[in-house]
Amino acid sequence: MPRKKILLVDDAETILMMERMILGRDYDLIIAKDGQEAVEKARVERPDLILLDIVMPVMNGIEACRMIRSDESTSDVPVIMVTTRGSEDIVKSAFESGCNEYVTKPINKIELLNKIKNLLGE
Amino acid sequence: MKDEDKGSYVHRVREDTQRYIKDLLGENERLRNAVAVLEDEKRHLEAQLDVQAKMVRQEIERREKEKASLQKRLQEIESESLRFIDQYSKVEQHNANLANLYVASYQLHGTLNREEVLSVLQEIVINLIGSEEFGVFELNQNKTSFHLIASFGIDADRHKNVSASSSLIGRAALSGKTWIKGHGEAAEGLEYSDLLACIPLKLGGQVTGAVALFSLLSHKPELEEVDYEMFDLLATHAATALYCTELHAARAGASE
């Protein structure tokens, strides 16, 4: 069975490294460091899931998620938002932009893996 | 009817009656024997039934014991399984904690550029500890104050210089031990008494600076075990990484 592909989007190298350590064993990983790059890589690479930070340069995660949802080729890719802010308005904005799930930083490995597996139907 | 005929008739009736009585007695005897056989058979069947009932009762008892034993074993397996799940979860959490520490250490020593080290330090505090109100301070040469060199979520001008003697940040940092609200000495009367934590940055046992945390992210209620490990790591690795950037800059300056 081919390994599933996850697009990791974050401008913080510490988070990308953490995510690589958590997910690298089970999934093929692609990296993007801002929202714009995420939208482009999602179109080209067609990942099975996107892990998207909210606060990023160039284009934030909320805007990137909207664009991913509005593009026919990526509209059905599951998106998990990763945010330092778990406040109600941020979470509401994230879901309004079309994300399927969200996790807060610091990332809890078990919580993240459960949400990914759930969205990938594993 | 003549007397002779009458006598013959009576005789015949008597004989018939006697024969009938004899038959009746014979039949009675036969029925008695049949009843005795049936009684015997009934007793035999009852005895058999008793034996079988006893066997069934014994079998039920054996099955009940077996069921209880299986239920006990099932409970043991379930509790063992829960214990394994709990252990697995702890190991996973432990791995995640180690990964956090590894990432922090790797990132801190991954550059010789001072700004990049400070940036990594900020990323660690925000993303791995979970605070968006903190400052990174450096101790001045005469050890009288701490100077803010990086911050996030606080008024940098207001916290530009912090007294080493009259502030909680200064006192806690110079003690050389990480100070945590509710765990360390009382902070009444000192500046920054509402501080959450202060991590001294140490180089060869000497305090060179401090990381002061003012609060945690709203969804993180309290510091966790891994945070204390991270504080220990920052205490030495952040100071070393910053010192290396100075050495590198000095060497680069000397070679120019």
Image: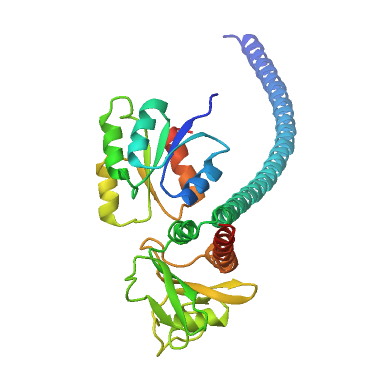
Q: Is residue B250 left or right of residue B156?
A: right
At horizontal 40% and vertical 37% (from top left) the residue drawn is: A50
Give the percent coordinates (x, y) of residue A44: 39, 26
Is residue B168 visible in the rendered structure shown here? Answer: yes
Q: Give left or right: position of B62 versus A58.
A: right
Q: Between residues A103 and B214, which one lies in front from this camera angle?
A: B214
In the image, B221: left or right of B179? left
- In which quarter of the view is residue A79 placed? top left
Instruction: Indicate the position of residue B30 as horizontal and vertical percent values.
Output: 72, 23
Colouring used for the render:
rainbow
Judge whether residue A100 can be spotted in this image: no
- Looking at the image, the residue that sits furthest to the bottom is B189
**Above or below: residue A22 compared with residue B154:** above
Q: Position of residue B180 (x, y in %)?
A: 49, 76
Q: Quadrant of the C terminus of chain B?
A: bottom right
The image shows residue A36, relative to residue B1, as above or below, that is below
Count of marks placed on residues: 0
Q: Which x, y percent locates residue B134?
A: 40, 68
User: Residue B225 versus residue B248: which sits nearer the camera?
Assistant: B248
In percent of the image, x 30 and y 57: which residue is there? A87
The residue that appears at 56% across and 54% down in the rendered structure is B93
Q: Is residue A22 above or below residue B18?
A: below
Image quadrant where one finds the N terminus of chain B:
top right
Query: Would you place residue B69 above or below residue A6 in this image?
Result: below
For the residue pair A120 and B126, the one nearer the viewer reads as B126
